[in-house]
Image: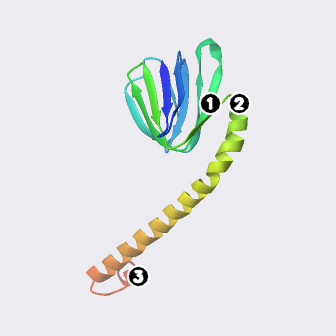
Amino acid sequence: MKLRIDTPLATVVDEDGVLAFRGEDVSGAFGILPRHAAYLTSLAICVVSWTAAGGTQRCCAVRRGVLTVTPGRDIAIATREAIAGDDIATLEKTVLSRFRDEIETERAERVDSTRLQLRAIREIMRHLQGGRPPSETFG
């Protein structure tokens, strides 16, 4: 297979002979082997890894992105930022710590957004029930 990882500024990885690939999306980790079906997913902030020709292990940290698989041949990732490396432990430690603040900020924003949505739903329900608080109706 061929793997290509592109950012808006550069092609970070362009490699033929990929034997296996591992990535992570919001539902969890997944793998891609030759002759994989067409696939499209949104990547999480993660370290993707692959086995290159000759059994060499390689990896790259990506700050989200879109991964597409052309049936059985090409894996393409478009991402905001990517940093290639040879040692997954070192890459995870240095790069993901850089992204950690962004991960925590996003998590807090999702919690705040969910709270606002719930508050809006409660207000709508109260309005639809003639001004009665939800606890009187659903209590």
Residue highlighted by disc 3: 135
Secondary structure of the residue carrying numbered label 2: loop
Residue 15: percent from the left, percent from the top?
Answer: 53, 21
**Which quadrant of the structure image shows residue 139?**
bottom left
User: What residue sits 54% from the left and 44% below the top?
Assistant: 63
36 relative to 115, above or below: above
Residue at the image position 37 percent from the left and 80 percent from the top: 134
Q: Residue at x 37, y 85 (%)?
A: 133
Using the image, determine if residue 38 lies above or below residue 116. above
Colour scheme in the image? rainbow
Quadrant location of residue 126? Answer: bottom left
Which secondary structure, mark 1? strand
Q: Earlier in the sequence, mark 1 or mark 3?
A: 1
Mark 2 touches mark 3? (CB < 8 Å): no
The residue pinned by badge 2 equals: 87
Q: Position of residue 40 (x, y in %)?
A: 39, 34
Task: Please give left or right for residue 115 compared with residue 102 in the image.
Answer: left
**Position of 106 relative to 75 (above/below):** below
Under mark 2, the amino acid is Asp
Residue 29 visible, this orientation: no
Dot 3, crowdedness within 10 Å: few (<14), some or many (≥20)? Answer: few
- SS label for mark 3: helix
Q: Amino acid at mark 1?
A: Cys
Q: Earlier in the sequence, mark 2 or mark 3?
A: 2
